[in-house]
Image: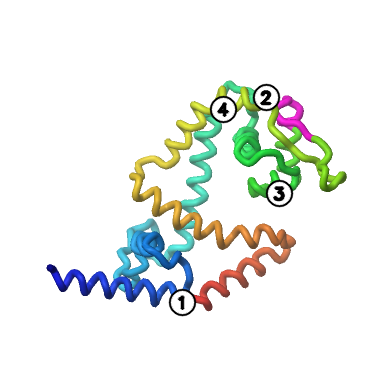
């Protein structure tokens, strides 16, 4: 038996337990341990920094991440526009809203808009287009008569299915040359960002104080770590 290897594994488990006791970022089982390893949490002292444009002149990692996220959003939008070209869909939001309704079922206008991280005016425009095309229908909510419940129609399902081949292909193109392991790592990192930003979004702070509210949450994460 390779006792040195066994000792290293035991030490690694000890590091995982100590780190997870402090952060509670992972489940305290083999799946959590595996994810901890995949995230590289055990090797914080030997970070392999990639090269990025402007690094030597002081450009920060935060700046690079923000720029790359914006770029990826624009690339994805362009592929989505190509996927719906020549169809009845006006924007990618039309089919994204329909996919949401198909996957999660009927919901109120507010729930549907929030599910897609939209501001209310933009979300209402999308819903109105879907209703006008008879792809979605709205009814009074049984819980609250002041609210409208939106559901996908049979015509909407047909329109969505007709375009799904191209839409699925566009989603594959967006993930580009990432292999399966890299996709899992990216999902983990993006989910971590989602878990940070979504509660801030759901508080719906006024735009005048949004940055201050978000920055206060950011500082909490730094103090906690």
Indicate which disc, 4 or 3, sits on the residue closer to the N terminus. 4
Residue occupying image coordinates x 39% and y 54% = 185
Q: Is residue 181 above or below residue 165?
A: below
* Secondary structure state at the residue bearing disc 2: helix
Above or below residue 222? Residue 27 is above
Q: Position of residue 40 (x, y in %)?
A: 34, 64
Query: What segment carries the magenta color?
Result: 129-138
Figure quadrant of the N terminus? bottom left
Name the residue located 50 percent from the left edge and 56 percent from the top edge.
Answer: 191
The mark that comes first in sequence, 3 or 2, is 3
Alpha carbon separation for disc pair 2 and 4: 19 Å
Residues packed near mark 2 inside 10 Å, few (<14), some (14 to 19) or many (20 plus): few
The disc, 3 or 1, on the residue closer to the chain's N-terminal end is: 1
- Tell me the CA gap for discs 1 and 2: 50 Å
Q: Earlier in the sequence, mark 4 or mark 1?
A: 1
Which label was assigned to residue 84?
4
Q: Position of residue 174 (x, y in %)?
A: 45, 40
Q: Is residue 94 above or below residue 221?
A: above
Q: Which residue is mark 1?
A: 22
Numbered mark located on residue 154 in the image: 2
Nearer-the-camera pick, 180 or 104: 104
Q: Nearer the viewer, mark 3 or mark 1?
A: 1
Earlier sequence position, callout 1 versus callout 2: 1
Q: CA distance from mark 3 to mark 1?
A: 36 Å
Q: Tell me if label 2 and label 4 are in contact, CB under 8 Å.
A: no
Can you tell which quarter of the image residue 59 is in? bottom left
Helix, strand, or loop for circle 3? Answer: loop
Q: Secondary structure at mark 1?
A: helix
The residue that mark 3 highlights is: 119
Report crowding for label 3: few under 14, some 14 to 19, many 20 or more residues within 10 A (C-alpha): few
């Amino acid at each position: 038996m390779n006792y040195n290897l066994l000792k290293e594994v035991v030490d690694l488990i000890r590091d995982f337990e100590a780190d997870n006791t402090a952060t509670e970022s992972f489940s305290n089982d083999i799946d959590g341990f595996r994810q901890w390893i995949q995230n590289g949490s055990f090797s914080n002292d030997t970070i392999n920094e990639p090269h990025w444009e402007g690094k030597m002149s002081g450009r920060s990692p935060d700046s690079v991440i923000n720029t790359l996220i914006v770029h990826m959003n624009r690339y994805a939008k362009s592929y989505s526009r190509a996927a719906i070209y020549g169809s009845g869909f006006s924007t990618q939001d039309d089919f994204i809203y329909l996919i949401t309704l198909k996957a999660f079922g009927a919901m109120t206008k507010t729930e549907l808009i929030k599910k897609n991280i939209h501001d209310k005016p933009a979300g209402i425009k999308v819903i109105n287009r879907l209703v006008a095309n008879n792809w979605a229908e709205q009814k009074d909510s049984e819980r609250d008569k002041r609210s409208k419940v939106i559901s996908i129609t049979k015509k909407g399902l047909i329109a969505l299915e007709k375009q799904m081949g191209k839409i699925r292909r566009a989603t594959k193109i967006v993930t580009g040359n990432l292999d399966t392991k890299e996709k899992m790592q990216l999902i983990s990192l993006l989910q971590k960002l989602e878990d940070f930003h979504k509660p801030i979004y759901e508080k719906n702070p006024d735009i005048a104080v949004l940055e201050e509210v978000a920055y206060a949450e950011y500082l909490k994460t730094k103090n906690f770590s």
